[in-house]
Each structure stands twice: as C-alpha cells, then as structure tokens.
Image (tube, rainbow, N blue to C red):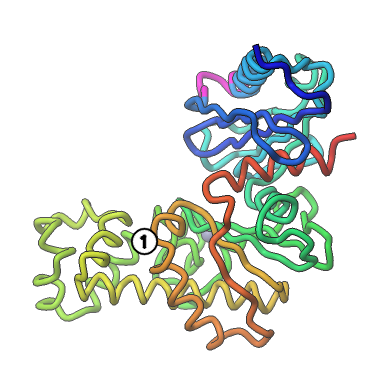
Amino acid sequence: MTIMAKGRYVIGVDLGGTWTRVGLSDEKGNFIEKINEKIDTRSSEAISKQIVKLTRFLCKKHHVNIAVLRGIGIASAGPLVQARGVLINPTNLPFKRVLLTEPITDELTTPACLINDCVGAALGENMFGAAKDLDNHVYITISTGIGGGAIVNGTLLLGKDGNGHEVGHLTIDYEGRLRCGCGKRGHWEAYCSGRNIPNFVRMRFEEIDEKMVKRSLLFTKLKGDLSELSTAGLFAAAKAGDSLSLQLVNDIGILNAVGFADVVNAYDPTLITVGGTVALKNKKMILTPIRKHVKDHAVNRIPKITITPLGKDVVIYGAVAAALRYLP
Ligand SMILES: [Zn+2]
C-alpha cells in the first residue's frame, strides 16, 4: 500500500472536445496519476458527475482524503463565465449551459474553480513550464482551433468573463475568403487550425496551376476526392517531400506568422510557447515559417518562440495552476 506523503493535493481537470482528463497532483505540479474518460454527454449534469466520480476514484486509489484536497481546477474550452463556474453555449458540447464548479463543490465539499483552457495553459506554463519567472509570456495553441493566453507584467489577463485572448478570431485576411466556425470571415482559425486547414488547401487548389496540383503526391493520394483532404494528410505529404504540400505548409506558416505578429504587437511578450496537436505533431514545419516571417509584420522586438515543454499536458498543468492560484 502506498502511503502518500503529508501535504496537500490538487485535482486538475482538462475538459477537452472529446476527453475528460483528471489528474491528481501535489502542490508542486508533480502528477501522481492522470486518467481519461470520454466526456459523458448524456446530460449537462453528467459532466460534473463524471469529474466527481474520477476525483473520488483517484483519491481512493492513492489514499488521499478528499476533505484535505486543496481543491479542483477545471480548464475548459469556452465560452465561459469564470466567476460562476459555468460554460455558456460551449462549442464542443451539445448543451446551452454546463454548470461545473457549484455541483462539484456541493458533492465533494471541496472548492473548485474554472478557467479557459488556453488562459489556464498560460498560467500552467508560468508556474511549471518554460515561462517560470517570466513576467511577459503568451501561450498559443494550434489545435482543432486556435487560442491563446497572456501574462503581461506578471498579471494573467482574463477579460470580463474570463474569455480574453480569442486570438484565433483575429482577422488575418481582410478579404475574408474563408468563413470561420464562429460565423465571421477572415479569422486566423479559418485558415490555419486543424479543423480548417483542409478548407484552406481546397481554396489554394483553385488558385494554383492545375497541372501542378494533379501531379502532386497530396492530390494523387486523395484519388480525386477532395472531401477526403485532412490536416494530417497534408503534413504527411509534406514530410514525404511533396513540393506542393511543402508550399502549402509554408503558406499556412506565413499566415500563422501574421497571427503571431499581431500577438507580439499586442502583448510584447518575452516568450511565446506553442502547443496544440497540429503544432506538437509538426513542430519544425509549424515553427520554421513563423520564426522566419513574424518580423515582416511585428513592430515590437521579436520574442523567443518555442514549443511548450509541457506538451499535451499543458492544459491539465494549467488546471492545477488555476486551483493553486485561485482557491484558498
Ligand atoms: Zn472566428
């Protein structure tokens, strides 16, 4: 039987698009265990019940008394109202409202707090990752969507409801050729996110010489069915040396550089760390064109731009960091 060292423990929850990840950590961000379950979407109440169930499971397994937990930090994609611990019309879940902190606190009699996933990730990076001791840091995710979190002069910027830094919806194409998931046109996320890169590629196919498209590895692998285009397929073809795919990846990188330059101009960070599945799976192909072209648009001194050392765990570290920062 493992007897846990004395001290207080924290639960971090990463509520993503598909998975509920719950981790038990000490107060220094050392995880004892992290577990995943598919998000229980049978009802909006089922999600908080699932977090309670997984918290009980982890605490029991590791002999941590729930009564002495420091608390539970939940980092979730928004939109959300942080002060009320509720998601409002969340993009990833089929509910109008998902109440999180109140039912969890009531059930476990332990405090809970909610934070936007990318804002939390910035805090996690600041407490446990590459931005330790930095007063000016931005975290950017390039994943299914694009988002960010910013620490300026040592202050985590939140906005009125905790939804600050929706940088994925910065306009990078004033002609608005592509429509974003939010309904508006020309947003960064509509061109460069995992969900929308296929739309960007289809648009570029219309503009590029047809012969070049048709003899590319990317096109031949699709056997003419452009609906089968995927972000993973584009990066795989680029890694195989397909010149058209390499050009498209570079085009995406130039647009990413516009978004990064906007962030540099707005927040003047010392460091930008980058996470999210698209960036983590294609580190060099994502970072190289950004580093090369950000100076074409930024007026402020260019910060260091690097992949987060916290990898796919950056959001769950952020959830733990939020609990440590906001709970008594
Ligand atoms: Zn948008």
- Taking depth in this image into account, of 174 and 115 the one nearest to the observer is 115
Q: Residue at x 73, y 52 (%)?
A: 123
Residue 327: in magenta span? no
- How many numbered marks does the figure carry? 1
Q: Quadrant of residue 262?
A: bottom right
Point 68% across, 85% down: residue:
301
Q: Nearer the viewer, residue 74 or 81?
A: 74
The quarter of the picture where the C terminus appears is: top right
Q: Residues within 10 Å of mark 1 (few under 14, many from 20)?
A: many
The quarter of the picture where residue 30 lies is: top right
Q: Is residue 104 above or below residue 186?
A: above
Image quadrant where one finds the N terminus: top right
How far from the left and from the top, in percent, is residue 208? 22, 79
Range shown magenta: 40-46
Q: Position of residue 285 (x, y in %)?
A: 38, 68
**Left or right for 264, reference 256:** right
Q: Which residue: 77% across, 28% down?
A: 9
Q: Nearer the viewer, residue 69 or 247?
A: 69
Disc 1 element = helix
Q: Which residue is mark 1?
A: 197
Residue kind at label 1, given as amino acid type: Ile
> Residue 236: x percent and y percent?
26, 59
Side of 328 relative to 157 (left or right): right
Residue 257, relative to residue 16: is it above or below?
below
Question: Height in image: 259 above or below 37?
Answer: below
Across and down, in percent, residue 91 comes to 54, 42
Mark 1 Cβ and ligand 1 under 8 Å apart: no
Q: Residue furthest right?
A: 328
| Residue 156 vertical placement versus 191 (above, below) | above
